Image (cartoon, rainbow, N blue to C red):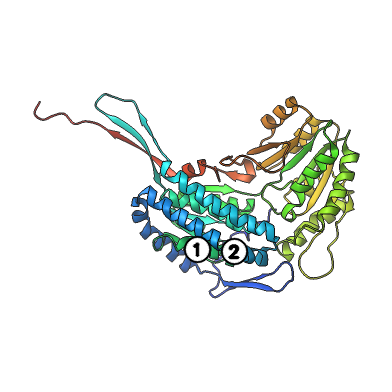
Amino acid sequence: MTPHHETPPSEVAPPPNREVTVLDPRSGEVASRVRVATEQECADAVRAARRAALDWARTPAAERAAAGRAGAAAVRAAADELAELNERETGKTADDARGGVDAGAGTLEQYAELGPVHRGHTLNGGWSALDMMVPQPRGVAVVLTPWNDPVAVAAGLLGAALVTGNTVVHKPSERCPTTGRRFAEILAAHLPPDVLRIVDGDGAAGAALAAAPVDVVAHVGSTATGRRIALACARSGARALLENGGNDPLVVDEGVDPEWAAEQAALGSFANAGQICVSVERIYVHAAVADRFTAALTDQARVWADRVGPLVDRAHRDHVHSHVAAAVSGGARALTGGAVPAGPGTFYPPTVLAGCEPRMEVLRAETFGPLGPVRTVPDFATGLREAADDGYGLAATVLPRDMAHAQAAWRELPVGTVKVNAVFGGAPGGAAQPRRGSGQGFGYGPELLDEMTTTKLVHLGSAPDPRG
């Protein structure tokens, strides 16, 4: 089960005039309400985007890029508004919310620069002919985005789709509908009519859009939802671009500083209350450093207790706590945290579990909360083997003792991204393909432009001269 991004699509058409109500995770008060789009409204948005597609594809790449740059500037100007909406709907801390808006604006700028230089290839053939491999927009893209970083994630998918000449129908997560809508409205104000359409709704609206006659469906969210989208795309022929859930491991080797390793583990496990797509979900630590590491991680959890915001809603907190409670019932020990606090909101304390076993759900499934479940292993090879024994394949982090272990880790772990000696970070423009239950396709970086386009081979031959 991976519930962290959105309600799974429903196979049943929703009744009209339904509303989604979002509660502020900090206080429990109503943060926003939106009406769920009907199936007909979803279809109308797709048709409008289809009508606008040809003109937008014909728009010079430099003009599309200029629109992207203008949108990025407008997003920066509205950063305080967007960050405040995000705090109210998802419980993000002020710094995290503002950082997500800044990252989103930077991503729009990046794709505005990359779009006009996205290029094809020419091929050497006969003297009197020319062959070209030409990238063209796919057409209409449905973009379904999550709540845990709604501006930054949406900016990447929308920016890449738009600069390559696609029109877009965007449905933000129902857990942050006004944040997602406001961001898209700011961007759409710098585009021709219907090039970017916005649809409000939950899983039922997402299902209607995923099944519509479109050309690409880009989704960041749960594995369950991603698999339903893949089935819908198999029926329609649309390209499915999916970043699904993850169960990212951290492997700690002998010979590393256990206190430094604990700082890395705490950052990966507790930042944004563990609600980051590449959060550390499970920890494998060499027996030689396990006691010192676990004690240091417990200290780190107590430090992080004053920094962590709430979980996104009560249902998600119930999910996180169910994983913790099941582990404790199965023999794990909660060294700190592990209890639902009293009071308003949906806070959950940073929690460290020791004595975790492979059968436990905290190691087998994505929890997506402020949790550090520790599994002690006899050697690094065992840590790698158990880390790889998983149905997901998003990312992993290793803290190795030497280069030989680092090389073994990145070669052997079946994930899209392997991070060595740092749980977060990386050069701008990096891109990876998730594996197995974590999805398919490049979801960011320059390679995302390739995902949003399709290649046409053009052979230009020369007709014989009728004059001889």
Q: Is residue 348 above or below residue 112?
A: below
Residue in view at x 73 percent, y 71 percent: 28
Q: Is residue 24 above or below residue 272?
A: below
Q: Are marks 1 and 2 in contact (CB under 8 Å)?
A: yes
Please state which amino acid type lies under the numbered disc 1: Ile
The span from disc 1 to disc 2 (Cα, nearest Å) is 10 Å
Q: Position of residue 12 (x, y in %)?
A: 56, 65
Q: Which residue is mark 2?
A: 82
Q: Position of residue 226 (x, y in %)?
A: 59, 51
Image quarter where the C terminus lies is top left
Under circle 2, the secondary element is helix
Under circle 1, the secondary element is helix
Image quadrant assignment for residue 401:
top right
Q: Is residue 198 or residue 309 the one in the foreground?
A: 309
Residue in view at x 62 percent, y 49 percent: 244
Q: Which residue is mark 1?
A: 186
Tell which residue pokes out farthest to the bottom in this image: 17
Q: Residues within 10 Å of mark 1 (few under 14, many from 20)?
A: some
Residue 391 seen in the current view: yes
| Marked residue nearer the N-terminal end (1 or 2) | 2
Q: Is residue 47 or residue 374 the one in the foreground?
A: 374
Q: Which mark is residue 396?
A: none
Q: Is residue 380 above or below residue 447?
A: above
Q: Is residue 348 above or below residue 278?
A: below
Residue in view at x 54 percent, y 75 percent: 17
Residue 211 seen in the current view: no
Q: Residues within 10 Å of mark 2 (few under 14, many from 20)?
A: many
Please state which amino acid type lies under the numbered disc 2: Leu
Tell which residue pokes out farthest to the left in this image: 467
